[in-house]
Amino acid sequence: MRMEKNIPDLVLVSTSSYRQELLRRASLKFRAVAPRFEEIHDHQGNPAELALALARGKAMGVAADFPNAILIGSDQVVW
């Protein structure tokens, strides 16, 4: 008898077809959802901190909908 592990759902908070393809190529089972987060680009600080803040905001925007999932929020900044 094989024991099934409780593996949390993986949720990509992105509509990016490129990011979805990256996860498919890694053979990961995931669900993609659109972020519900208003991006504000008036940040004067470090570009890496801005990308991190935007990624975190995207993930947090849907966190209540997926309380037991692993959320992947991502962003990039061209500087």
Image (cartoon, rainbow, N blue to C red):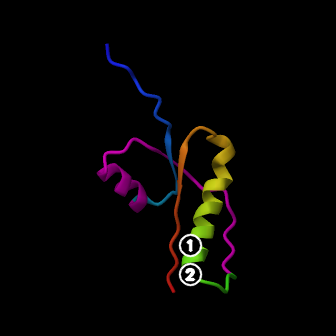
In the rendered view, tell whether residue 55 sits above or below residue 33.
below
Q: Is residue 7 left or right of residue 48?
A: left
Please tell me which residue is depicted at 56% across the width and 81% down the height of the picture: 47
Does 34 sit above or below residue 31? below
Instruction: Give amino acid for label 2.
Output: Pro
Residue at 57% x, 69% y is 52
Q: x, y (%) of residue 36?
A: 66, 56
Give the alpha-carbon distance from disc 1 to disc 2, as whole Å.
6 Å
At x 58%, y 53%, the residue is 34
**Which residue is more in the foreground, 8 or 21?**
8
Q: Position of residue 35 (x, y in %)?
A: 61, 56
- Residue 39 rendering spot, x and y as whole percentages: 66, 70
| Disc 2 secondary structure class | helix
Q: Residue at x 59, y 83 (%)?
A: 46
| Magenta residues, start to end | 18-41
Q: Which residue is mark 2?
A: 47
Cβ atoms at labels 1 and 2 below 8 Å apart: yes
Tag of residue 51: 1
Residue 20 belongs to the span the image colors magenta: yes
- Looking at numbered disc 1 in the image, what kind of residue is underneath it? Ala
